Every structure is written in C-alpha cells, then in structure tokens.
Amino acid sequence: MFLGVRVLRLKSAFIVVSLAAVCMFATPAEPQSGDPSATLINRDAIVYSAGSGKVYVVDQARGAILVVDAQGTSKSVQVGMGPEAIAINERTGRVYVANSGDQSVSVIDGTSDSLVATVATAARPYAIAADEEENKIYVSNTFSDMLTVIDGSTNLASNLKTGSADAIVVDEKRRRVYLLGYESDTLTVLDPQTGAITKMPAGAMHLWGIAEAGRMLYVTHVQGATLAAIDVETHALKEIPTGAMPCALAVNANTGEVYVANYGDGSVTVVNDRGTVTGTVKAGEHPQAIAVDAGKDLIYVADTHQNTVSVIDGRTRKLVKILKAGSNPYALAIDPKTHRVYVANLSEPPLTVLSGDH
C-alpha cells in the first residue's frame, strides 16, 4: 500500500490519478520513460528471517529478490514478474514471493537461495502470509475475491472465495486467518480447518494497517484519526485516538507498546498495552512504514516523501535522528542481532542498509 496520491479504486486495487489521498499503486519518483507507469507496493516487500539471519527484499525492476546475509553479502535471485511481497516459513526454511506481474508465487529454498517451484495464483497476488504450523501459504489477489492457499508440502494451490483482502494475519494459536480489506468496516475471519468464514467488526470504513499482539488486533482507520483495538476472543472493540491518517503499525514485543505512523500530520502515536495513548512524537514528512528494534527500544519510521528514516527513542519518546534513505522508502526490516535497519525503496537502489549505531 502507498499513501500520497488520490486514486480511482476498482474492486480491490488502486490506480493513481493525481496527488491527494490513498493508494496501493504509485508512480516511480524518477520515471525511466515518458509513458505513465504504476507500481504496486506492499509493506512486506522486505522481511528478516530469524532462522537464517538473512534479509529478503523485492527488486521489482529486475524481477528478482535481493538476499543479504548477516555478513552483508548480497545475492540476487530471479523470481516472477513484478515481485511485491514476501513471506517466510521459518520451520521449513522456504521463502515465498508474490509476483503480481505474472500471477504467481515463487518458492525459494532458504538454505541455497535457489528457486524450487512456481505456483499459479487466482489473479494478481498482493498480500501473502505463512501458517508455519500447518505449512500453508495464504495469498490475496487484487481484482479478485479469491484467496489462494498453497500447500507447502506439495506446492499445490487451491482457491477460496473470501472477498478481497489487502493484508493477511495468521493467528496460529487460535487457528484463524484474519483478512483486512480497505473498503470495509469489518475483518474477514477464516477458519482454515473448516473453511468457515465469519466477520469481525473493525470500527470504521477504510482499514489500512494491522498488527497482532497477544489476543489483540490493532487496525488503523486511514481516512480518520483512530486506531481500533479488537479483542479477538470477545470481539470487544476500543477506539483509540491517533494523528491524522494513521497507516502503518508496529508492536514492541518487550513492552507491548503499539506505535502508529500517522501519514497526514507526520507523527507517531504511542499506545501502551492497556490501550491508552501515552505520547505523540514528531516524525518526518508523510511517514509510511514503521518498525521496532525491541532490543534497543528504538522505533524507525520511513518518511516516504522525504526520502529519510526517522529514529525515535522508545524510552524518552523523542526524535533522536533523521537518516538518509533511498528514493521513497516504503518498507522496513530490522536484524535484532546486528541492529541493522533494511529499507525497501520505491526507486533505485531497491535497498538501503542503515547502521544500528544510534
């Protein structure tokens, strides 16, 4: 997803038409030709593997992903056309890449970083998530109400009619899959064992960011100024005030604090584990992505239209540094061991690596 342009929405996709509001497509900052172009981008364009210590990032222009190990050595692996998002099954070591350009998912062996299979999807894949316990991969499809489910053991795919989804969260403890759709005021809840589909109230229309912490699901209302805290056991919902146009979310696993990047006013709202706002921190222009280094209690915010990453101290709740990134940074991943910050950029180069020494 990408903010900062007004869009025409068709089914579950957004097409850029001019500067103003909300979208998933975005034109590159420096087009390579005179023809208009659009790129679909995703918060999971970059991921860290705890099992291997590697970072994977999409390289859309080359139809590849970059693999960076803990020593900083990088490797490019060819996948399908228009890679958008990545999911990892840490139990099997398999890496899954949603390729929107050719309606497929690339399956990569995380040990050798080699392509082992290509799986067709129902339509143009966008969001992707792994159920490690069941060894299943869930893939949403833009312009479609079908959810593609890949069996990790056989790489065979099936499709379920769930409605359109722009984000997926797998709750392995409760055996549930939560599907978030922008043009809805509810979450779709899938029982993967029975195939049953139910709805969970999310508080308002135009849902954007989603994060899970314990029995709570946090969902932002991007065209408002609130965050929904939903108890997945009781479905009780609490509205929490935020800054303007809350989009991305991150949770500090050590403290339980939730951080909300507010695109509209360039701020970050801090919410404690009881659902109370405990601070607001100024960030850079139009923050789009956010990530937490729990070990250092540092919060990193991608200031997409400022080409920077803001660094916030979680203890003092103050902005401590603004770092240069690449062109239009839109997704973040953190190595908790080296504390390096990996930044996915919309334009070249596709990856910026920042030192964690702050």
Image (cartoon, rainbow, N blue to C red):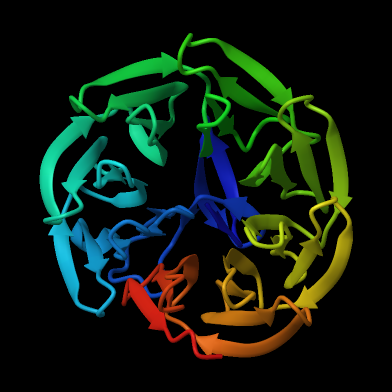
Q: Is residue 122 visible?
A: no
Residue 235 in the image, given as x and y percentages of width and height? 78, 26
- Is 293 rendered above or below residue 165? below
Q: Quadrant of residue 354?
A: bottom left
On screen, residue 231 versus residue 164, left or right, reads right
The residue lying toward the viewer, choosing from 298 and 246, is 298
The residue lying toward the viewer, choosing from 22 and 343, is 343
Residue 127 in the image, given as x and y percentages of width and height? 44, 41
Q: Quadrant of residue 113?
A: bottom left
Of the 4 image quadrants, the one containing the C terminus is bottom right
Residue 34 in the image, given as x and y percentages of width and height? 32, 68
| Residue at horizontal 15 percent and vertical 59 percent from the top | 77
The residue lying toward the viewer, choosing from 251 and 52, is 52
Q: Is residue 225 visible?
A: yes
On screen, residue 299 versus residue 282, left or right, reads left
| Residue at horizontal 21 percent and vertical 22 percent from the top | 156
| Residue at horizontal 59 percent and vertical 59 percent from the top | 5
On screen, residue 156 versus residue 230, left or right, reads left
| Residue at horizontal 28 percent and vertical 28 percent from the top | 121
